[in-house]
Image: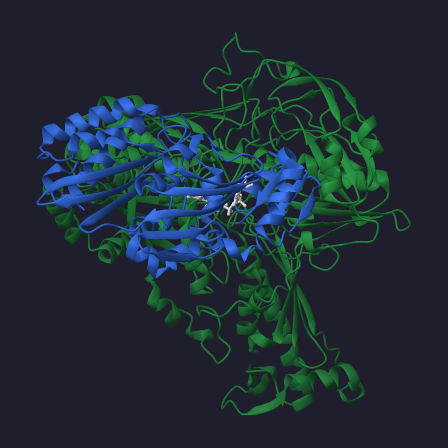
Amino acid sequence: MKASAFAYARPTSVANALELLATHGDKAKVLSGGQSLMPAMNLRLISPEFIVDIGELAELRGIVVKGDVLTIGALTRHADVLKSPEVAAHAPLLRDATAHVAHPAIRNRGTLGGSLAHADPASELPACMMALEATIIVCGPRGERRIPAQEFFTGIYETGLSPQELLVAVELPVARKRSSHFFHEFARRHGDYAIVGLAAQSIVVDGYFTDLRLGFFAVGDRPLLANAAGELVNVPVTPERLTKAAAVLSDELDPQEDQQATPAMRRHLAKVLLSRCVSTLLSRPDLRSGAPE
Amino acid sequence: MTDAPETRDALSALDRPNSYIGKTMPRPNLDRLMQGRGLYVSDIELPRMGHVVFLRSPHAHAKITGINALAARQLPGVIAVVTGQELATVITPWVGVLSHLKGLKSAPQSAIAIDRACWQGEAVAAIVATSRAAAEDAAEQVSVGYDELDAVTDMRTALDPTTSVIHASLGDNLAFERHHDAGAVEDAFAASDEVVDVEFIFGRHTGVTLEPRSVVADWNAAEARLTIYQGTQAPHMVQNIAALHLGLQEAQVRVVCKDVGGSFGIKVHIYADEMATYALSKLLRRPIKFVADRVESFNTDIHARDHRCRGRIGVKRNGTIMAFEIDDLTGIGPYSMYPRTSAIEANQVVNLVGGPYVTRNYRARARVVFQNKNVMCQYRAVGHPIACSVTEGLVDLAAMKIGMDPVEIRRRNLIADDAYPCASPSGLRFEQLSHHAALAKLIRMMDYDVLRAEQAALRARNIHRGIGIASFIEVTNPSAAFYGVGGAKISSQDGVTVRLDAQGAVICQTSITEQGQGSESLTAQIVGSVLGVSMDRVRVILGDTDNTPYGGGTWASRGAGIGGEAALQATKVLRRNILDVAAAILQMTPGELDIVNNNVVNAGDGTSRIELGELARIVYFRPDTLPPGIQPELMATRHFVPRAYPFAFTNGVQASWLEVDTETGFVKLLKHWVVEDCGTIINPQLVDEQIRGGVVQGLGAALFEKCVYDERGQLTNASMADYLVPMSGEMPDIDIGHVVSPTLESELGAKGAGEAGTAGAAAAVTNAVNDALRPFGTIVTEIPLTPQIILTALGRI
Ligand SMILES: Cc1cc2nc3c(=O)[nH]c(=O)nc-3n(C[C@H](O)[C@H](O)[C@H](O)COP(=O)(O)OP(=O)(O)OC[C@H]3O[C@@H](n4cnc5c(N)ncnc54)[C@H](O)[C@@H]3O)c2cc1C
């Protein structure tokens, strides 16, 4: 379990990093927190010839709020997201989700940009980006691109990033008035990737959803912003409504089989999550499936 | 038999300033380990040392048609690429059988496969280079030609006539079969009011030690001596086997075992890749290091459990258990492991089922079959978790059927505490067990009735919690009956030497080993207590065949009971010898003197007469001042082995309290209790932590751990990401209580404690899950109890 030999560079500016990526292209890999890249290299699942370590690019680190926009640099570590008062105030969903990402040692090194660029369909953070209407900002040889989260994730470990591009930051609209959120995942152990998870952001007025964004993860080859939410917005939510929404959800899902679960089990768990989410956000215990909390 | 707090009174004869027995003492090796000054095999660097990487078969079963290593040999840093054929010139193959396991058969196994690979992960070539990374680079350049053969993967069809036979010379895929029939089983079932008949399924799992298996072998051609640095539980066994197959005398092999990062039975066997490493050192005449990486560990560290066991129980409406019957099937991989064999686990299952109960009626069959999967062998609590899960599962299902409380059915059937000595239906002899005292204590600790009331109240609110109880017996302190009688050169006796040095400190050499259990600590505690010296004066040396007495090592819950007694007896002799010298110096009789707190004192009033350092000074440097005729012997050795009983059985009972989310199939462990009886407790904290660690491994089996093979014999989850070990986040608090029934076979009275936790944990959890699922009219009898299994049982998916 030793990586094959590779060349290594530690650029000192984004411009410098982009030059290196332009030169080495497909043969290069960006190294951020290394928590996904290094295990893959040690297992020799991938053997990049050139490593561009972006760890020193201070310009990619940090969390700022400007007007209605919360910007988080790509190099911001999971641990910093967890501790950030700005994130707690303006995107509490992201804070709750990050607490479920791996373990403290991994969160101390792993970065938001790395997680999004890695695009593991079972990861919490891409789904949060969808639920939070994030914009992913990338820089490449032809300048900056701003990609809506919903278009960024294109498949298992696949994104809209080209090998010459660097993910530099994400922008999130700050949480609106009366917004609430729900995060839950089913994982065999704390810190494991989820079997199925849900990151949801909503606005509830007088017992109605006026907005509901359901970001499911580990239910297909990429995170899913469920259309089922449409069944629940601006209508009184009855058990029958919820059942209807669950049926719509079931049709949208394309869950994979793995050692933890069959597709049928994933569909089932996603529906349980939906009911628990709606019940929690509307404070309606009658809608909850299974035992009370 | 007493409850734990009284233990200390029972040992009042030793209750002096230096009485460490029964007290929690910090482990003497802690500072060394905490300050990073441990010496693990990976830390060892020798001049000219080569690193070996094994190229391993990607197929479960394949003929090797050719190996081309030309390109690899050209790479920088590569020292050699060695095939099985080439290595066979220095090391002979072996067959893992023992004569007392009648009918057990296996095929010759080579250090590196020759012609044929029999499991995915078997080594087919060794690549030796100046670093592990260089050897891995070269391994990618070795091309091996394979013709895939049929792989035998399903144990249920391994004996079918249509299934191919793995080793043609053996005739079939049956490695071992055992039948047992005691009492009048047919009549007992006929006379039963209810009979329960179910199949229990146990996932294959493995030990997952923090430090992987690792070896440095250093053949010194000038001395004609091989030094093996290895993290092993049994150095003398390794010495014997290495010598035997390398054509050496045992005196030509030294095994050094410094710090070991966990073993759990994984490191008590002889592995082909370790044998290959010894042989490579001899072949290449230089030190060779092998450190398994995590993927290799999953593919080659012994696996265990993987049983399917049909069980039947007959019960009267009044709760009397009439009979047990089992039919156990297990698949062990392509070879029986060496030298302890892979039949022991199934054999133990037959031995142990029904063991806590009075019924005499018991019938069993166990079959052990070959497969093209990694080898299986003994791992912590060998066979016990299976026997316990089957027995206790059946007892609970029987209770459910007749509508009796699970505690009550146990009260009515467990062997009475005053019925000893007696024997189990399989013929195991019990000296003294304490099932009822243990159960009574457990019920008090868990507040059983309150818990039942809470369960009922929550059920009304759609919250489903369950209570599971599991009584168990455990094999500890094995005598020669375990391996020796079968012809294995695995010592069941252990030896300890104690010596007073020139400043009055004590050096103690013991043949038991330390892999984290606290062997060093318990040995020092015993020596300090018996001699009357403070623990900081006692230094324990272990893990070196050149420098310790001959003995078995640490496995099968034997270190404290056997090695501890040898330490006690050796120290008694040293103490007598010291008092003889002191009496001569002080012109008194030995009976008038005692040793307390590093001083020889007046037995009567405790006045200090001579410090041990001063006594040692006189003995070693001014013997001329001693009276004529006195020859001090300040070094003593004693050995010990249990003879009266083949095993010192221990017993105990565990309970689990958990919640099942019936919508998702997830189980949340809320609390776990253990009451066990390991006889004399030397260090309560060590015992409790051994039990907790054991419980956690048992909980891992219950909920998480499984080596998942596909139908082609590929292990599909050989990484820490996919093979789920239990982690602290999911573990409940584990409360531990004790009942103390010392064994009279030794003065110390200690039995083993290292495996008790693992023995019953999964059984308690499975019973608790079934208790929780009671309103749904379904049961589960397969572990690990995954959400998928529970949801399926509930009909949710
Ligand atoms: C034991 C363990 C458990 C884990 N559990 C979870 C979990 O439950 N949930 C979860 O979400 N994650 C989990 N992870 C992964 C962890 O969150 C990683 O930190 C994350 O996926 C990758 O972030 P990183 O900064 O470490 O990226 P790296 O490993 O450095 O890189 C990952 C990939 O992204 C690319 N990349 C990184 N940064 C950029 C960039 N700025 N621009 C372009 N490409 C880039 C790299 O080239 C590489 O391909 C776990 C990891 C481990 C080791």
Quarter of the figure with residue B423: top left
> Is residue A47 among the parts visible in the rendering?
no
Q: Specify the colour of chain A.
A: blue
Which image quadrant is residue A87 in?
bottom left
Outermost residue toward the right in this view: B222
Q: Position of residue B693 (x, y in %)?
A: 44, 52
Image quadrant holding the C terminus of chain B, namely: top left
Quadrant of the drawing holding the N terminus of chain B: bottom left
Left or right of B574 in this view: A222: left
Colour green belongs to chain: B
Would residue B357 be found to the left or right of residue B568 on screen? Answer: left
Nearest the camera: B228 or A250? A250
Above/below status of B361 relative to B430: above
Protein image colouring: by chain
Q: Position of residue B388 (x, y in %)?
A: 37, 38
B101 sits left or right of B129 in the view: left
At x 46%, y 65%, the residue is B683
Q: Work out whether residue A174 or residue B221 is closer to the camera in this orientation and state it.
A: A174
Closest to the observer, B518 or B635: B518
Number of numbered discs on residues: 0
- Residue A233, visible in the rendered structure: yes
Q: Is residue B218 left or right of residue B211?
A: right
Q: Position of residue B172 (x, y in %)?
A: 58, 14
Please say if A200 is above or below B436: above
The residue positioned farthest toward the front in the image shown: A142
Question: In the displayed image of the protein, which residue is found farthest to the top?
Answer: B162
Could you say where residue A184 lies in the image, as x and y percent from the top left? 29, 43
Q: Is residue B514 above or below residue B176?
A: below
Quarter assignment of residue B533: bottom right
